[in-house]
Amino acid sequence: MLVKWGSIIVKGSGKLGGHVFSGGPNGASVHTLARARNPQTVYQTGVRSRFTKFTQGWRDLTESQRETWYDAEESFSRTNRFGDVVSLSGKNLYESLNANRQIIGLGVINLAPLPTEIPEAIVRDVNISNGGASIVIAGQFKGSTDFVVVASPGLSQGSRNGKNESRVIGIGRSNTGGTVIDGFNERYDDYVARFGIPNSNRKIFIGLYSVSISGQRSPISSVVADF
């Protein structure tokens, strides 16, 4: 739950108890949280496993190693949904950067890194070909970079964006950079494994983000896929 305090609460975003707080063009709103069943999928199990791994990893650090993460808190400050600059705690920073690194196949770092440049990724067009069983992602990408591909399930045509519904479906590498990322046809199989065969009557958002060597990640760039 994210709250911004004034003389009284002036903004709220997230979950609290059995309710969800959000804001939009028509003002703030609150609705009852619908509790989905827990199917214990492979993806959920993987997320929980990573969380357990990094929680234990933080406990196993030496005090001097933990101090480097405390000292790095302000260096990795970020802007939240309200536009305020915030910093993660040393423990949360350790978990966040290492989780991002693991997604692209990098190992765990025990000492806090220095901030590094985050390769920009701009997605301009995504095409899904059921007949050719492929997903082609076009835009502007930096070479020698791994990008994390995210996608939403089929949503209603009235959906404005799929950010909250998007999940990681795979990794694609841009070896040369340019306007098309190499090897993304395999992402079609990844999508089917996660969400089933894509339906052209539904709105599907597909995009990606990049992760730097330090574990920092770029914002997600996504568009509605064409069929």
Image (spheres, helix red, strand yellow):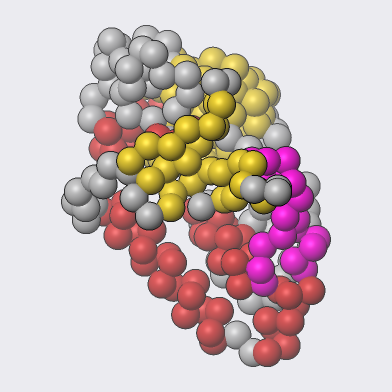
88 drawn magenta: yes
* Relative side of 198 to 109, left or right: left
What residue is at 67 percent from the left and 72 percent from the top? 90
Q: In the rendered image, which quarter contains the C terminus?
A: top left
Residue 96 visible in the displayed image: yes
Residue 53 higher or lower than 182, as above or below: below
* Relative side of 107 to 83, left or right: left
Magenta extent: 72-90
Task: Give whichever of 12, 43 is nearer the camera.
Answer: 12
Residue 227 higher or lower than 143, as above or below: above
The quarter of the displayed image where residue 34 is located: top left
What residue is at 70 percent from the left and 35 percent from the top? 120
The quarter of the displayed image where residue 127 is located: top left
The quarter of the displayed image where residue 33 is located: top left
What residue is at 49 percent from the left and 46 percent from the top? 14
Residue 52 higher or lower than 222, as above or below: below
Residue 107 at x, y percent in the picture:
56, 66
Task: Give whichever of 166, 119 is nearer the camera.
Answer: 166
Residue 27 higher or lower than 36, as above or below: above
What residue is at 42 percent from the left and 65 percent from the top? 50
Task: Give whichever of 128, 195 is nearer the camera.
Answer: 195
Residue 36 at x, y percent in the picture:
24, 45
155 drawn magenta: no
